Image (spheres, rainbow, N blue to C red):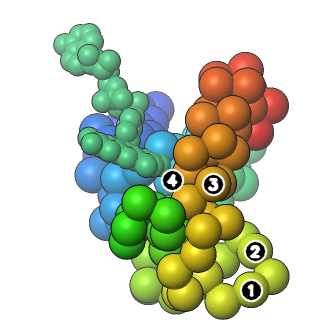
Amino acid sequence: MKYKNVFALGDCSSLPTSKTGAAIRKQAPATVANILDMINGKQLSGNYNGYTSCPLVTSYNSMVLAEFDYDKNPQESFPFDQSKERFSMMMLKKYGLPNLYWHGMLRGRA
Ligand SMILES: Cc1cc2nc3c(=O)[nH]c(=O)nc-3n(C[C@H](O)[C@H](O)[C@H](O)COP(=O)(O)OP(=O)(O)OC[C@H]3O[C@@H](n4cnc5c(N)ncnc54)[C@H](O)[C@@H]3O)c2cc1C
């Protein structure tokens, strides 16, 4: 790290993980914690494990939601096998994720 008071997140950060909005959702709290720690003269405590999420649309009615970390270990959010094509995941992308984005992420709630 060359400049200790410069922080980056999102697509411009060039972190070795897939660049997605889902990744930014996990990067943002770690970045905020680190900036606050720096301002307060504390050791940086924010941590990010490379989590990212790729919605793979497999048909008009199905999708696989791949979620993984820096080491490509699965980081699945749901209590079922997400490697299977599912209608429910397509509905999540169509209706759930836009809500999460507009009403959660952009308002700092999620
Ligand atoms: C087709 C497509 C589909 C995607 N689908 C998904 C998905 O389903 N799920 C998901 O999680 N992610 C998805 N992504 C990825 C997601 O959109 C990006 O990872 C995310 O938008 C990156 O956010 P960011 O804020 O880092 O960068 P950006 O959203 O690129 O924001 C950067 C901003 O900086 C502005 N800018 C650039 N240069 C300057 C300058 N010199 N001065 C001032 N402003 C400047 C740009 O205009 C832009 O508004 C998709 C991306 C693409 C392209």
SS at mark 2? loop
Residue 25 location (% of width, % of height)? 60, 45
Q: Is residue 18 above or below residue 1?
A: below
Which residue appears at 56% of the width and 51% of the height?
A: 93
Residue pointed to by mark 1: 80
Q: Is mark 4 within 8 Å of ligand 1?
A: yes
* Tag in front: 4 or 2: 2
Residue pointed to by mark 3: 91
Question: Which is nearer the N-term, disc 4 or disc 2?
Answer: 4
Q: Nearer the viewer, residue 104 or 27?
A: 104
Label 1: how many Cα within 10 Å (few below 14, some 14–19, many 20+): few
> Is residue 105 visible to us here?
no
Q: Amino acid at mark 3?
A: Met
Q: Is residue 98 above or below residue 18?
A: above
Residue pointed to by mark 4: 23
- Are the two marked residues, 4 and 3, in contact with CB atoms closer than 8 angstroms? no
> Is residue 31 visible to us here?
yes
* Tag in front: 4 or 3: 3
Q: Is residue 107 above or below residue 19?
A: above
Q: Amino acid at mark 1?
A: Phe
Residue 78 location (% of width, % of height)? 75, 74
Q: Amino acid at mark 4?
A: Ala
- Are the two marked residues, 3 and 1, in contact with CB atoms closer than 8 angstroms? no
Label 4: how many Cα within 10 Å (few below 14, some 14–19, many 20+): many
- Are the two marked residues, 4 and 2, in contact with CB atoms closer than 8 angstroms? no
Residue 107, quarter of the rendered image: top right
